Amino acid sequence: MTTSQTSSPTEPTSGRWNMDIVIAAIVSTVAVAAIFFSRKFPTTGLTTDIGSARFPQIYAGALLVLCAMLVARHWLQGRPKPQAVPEGQVVNVEVRSYRKTFFGVVSSVICLAAMPYLGYGLVTASYLSFLMWLMGMRHKAWNPVLAISIAAVLYVTFSVGLNVPLPIGSLFE
């Protein structure tokens, strides 16, 4: 009788780039660019106004902290030592598929392109519902309910709370 063991998905492969480091580098670059370019955002001159650049700078700062934590976790884990597989045991190696990542990125681009035409509410609710389905949450009733709820909370936060106008959509004007 044979038993199967799964190799650790975090085990680095020699000669290949570690995706944790690559992702942290890309996101850090975008965050630094956001901080740099948001410094030139105009201010209103009101004493109570924190400025339009404050939100992107806070968000970019949080991204930099999270990227640093990702790199630190990678370095602190170290390289696990390969374990010898006894004779007769089968090792199942996890095959990574980037198909979900590809569809997630493509759907994000489609969402950004469709928002000026279809508006924030419709695009965001359908986008979030699709992403939940893509990530494995396949409930026919909960996906739309959660997506609409999240879109509504974000709409109230930005439109009412922060007074940021969100796109209505040229088809609905």
Image: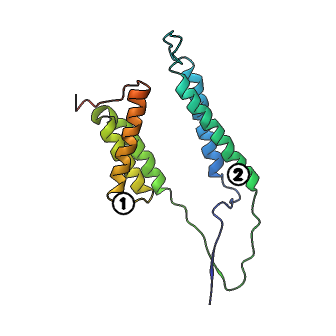
Q: Is residue 76 above or below residue 60?
A: below
Q: Amino acid at mark 2?
A: His
Spot occupied by residue 111 in the image (x, y as percentages of width and height): 37, 40
The crowd level at tag 1 (other Cα within 10 Å; few <14, some 14-19, many 20+) is few
Point out which mark residue 139 bears.
1
Q: Residue at 38% x, 60% y: name it.
A: 138
Would you name the residue on which mark 2 appears? 74
Q: Amino acid at mark 1?
A: His
Q: Quadrant of the C terminus?
A: top left
Q: Quick one: 48 or 110, which is closer to the camera?
A: 48
Spot occupied by residue 90 in the image (x, y as percentages of width and height): 63, 80
Residue 88 shown left or right of residue 163 in the figure? right
Q: Is residue 17 above or below residue 48?
A: below
C-alpha gap between disc 2 and disc 1? 34 Å
Q: Quick one: 78 or 121, which is closer to the camera?
A: 121
Q: Residue at 29% x, 30% y: name it.
A: 168
Q: Is residue 167 above or below residue 17?
A: above
Residue 151 shown left or right of residue 46 in the figure? left
Residue 46 shown left or right of residue 147 in the figure? right
Q: Residue at 53% x, 22% y: name it.
A: 53
Q: Residue at 60% x, 70% y: name it.
A: 93
Spot occupied by residue 171 in the image (x, y as percentages of width and height): 22, 32
Q: Quick one: 18 or 135, which is closer to the camera?
A: 135
Point out which mark residue 171 bears.
none
Q: Quadrant of residue 31?
A: top right
